[in-house]
Image (tube, rainbow, N blue to C red):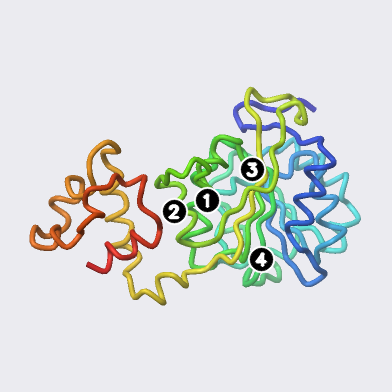
Amino acid sequence: MRAKKSLGQNFLKSEAALQKIIGAGELGPKDTILEIGPGKGVLTERLLVHAGKVIAVEKDRELVEFLKTKFEKEIGERKLILVNDDILNFSAEQNVPERSSAQAGAPSKANFQQKIMCAESGNVLRSYKIIANIPYNITGAILKKFLTSKNQPERMILMLQHEVAQRVVARDGKESILSISVKAYGQPKMLMKVPARYFSPAPKVDSAVIAINNISREIFKTSGVDEEKFWQIVKKGFAHKRKKLSSNLKGLVEKEKLSLLGKLGDKRAEDLTLTDWIKLSNL
């Protein structure tokens, strides 16, 4: 079965990486795992051994048929719920089906939600972890979708492009909208680098496993900062990377308050920590 470039498919074949991912997940029999793009089920096999239930969302119809055969026993036992759809259509606030299902034709948000709502015996996904080798072309969309959802996962263990993983943890000491977006909701950590040769087919870039632990909205609750306003300020602050923060925030922050920025106003957005952004928002 060939990987499809259009779906960003690169199948992992590194035993060391698989062990690292499973270990970082700290899995137990009570855990529910949401796996994004299970592919040929290499990671799925290990998740099923260590977790209580796995919900695997796969967009590729051919792979779904392959997985239905490979995991017929686990699907029959309802330990594996296999869903044929785009992960960006998935809603952790909706009822998750008790039985695996695969719809014909192109996935759509309306069909996906209808399929879930009409499940024979659904249950709301209350506590879950995301563990996946995700399609790299939708990394940003996946992070935003689940970190900002009402029903957040408690942790995420993800395989990303190495360069993107470095940006998430701000390895060079320079922050970005991506790194602040992750750190505002959890604690990211780089776990290991995975060279391109450990995938089939081998991508043009190396990958890395990252963990995002302790996911919550606690920072907004404890600081009293409005989440929506916080992101308005962050996006405005990063609008022009080479300009000082005081220049970027003109028009959003009142003139008299700009003077209260002090030394922060002379810095560029990439030099500000998450704590600095919280202070700015409190102005």
Q: Please give the name of the residue rendered at 52% of the width and 46% of the height, measured from the top-left corner.
A: 168
Q: Amino acid at mark 4?
A: Tyr
Q: Quadrant of residue 222?
A: bottom left
Tell me the element at label 3.
loop
Q: Amino acid at mark 1?
A: Leu
Q: Nearer the viewer, mark 2 or mark 4?
A: 2
Q: Earlier in the sequence, mark 3 or mark 1?
A: 3
Give percent across and percent down for residue 242. 27, 36
Residue at the front extreme, as displayed: 263
Residue bearing the label numbered 1: 143
* Nearer to us in this view, 267 or 138: 267
Residue at the right extreme, as displayed: 73
Q: Earlier in the sequence, mark 3 or mark 4?
A: 4
Marks 1/2: CA distance? Answer: 9 Å
Give percent across and percent down for residue 122. 67, 70
Residue bearing the label numbered 4: 128
Marking on residue 230: none
Q: Earlier in the sequence, mark 1 or mark 4?
A: 4
- Circle 1 crowding by C-alpha within 10 Å: few under 14, some 14–19, many from 20: some
- Assess whether mark 2 and mark 1 are in contact (beta carbons under 8 angstroms): yes
Residue bearing the label numbered 3: 134
Q: Assign the C terminus to one quadrant of the image.
A: bottom left
Q: Please give the name of the residue rendered at 61% of the width and 52% of the height, measured from the top-left corner.
A: 189
Q: Please give the name of the residue rendered at 44% of the width and 70% of the height, measured from the top-left corner.
A: 219
Marking on residue 181: 2
Tell me the element at label 1.
helix
Q: Quadrant of residue 215?
A: bottom right
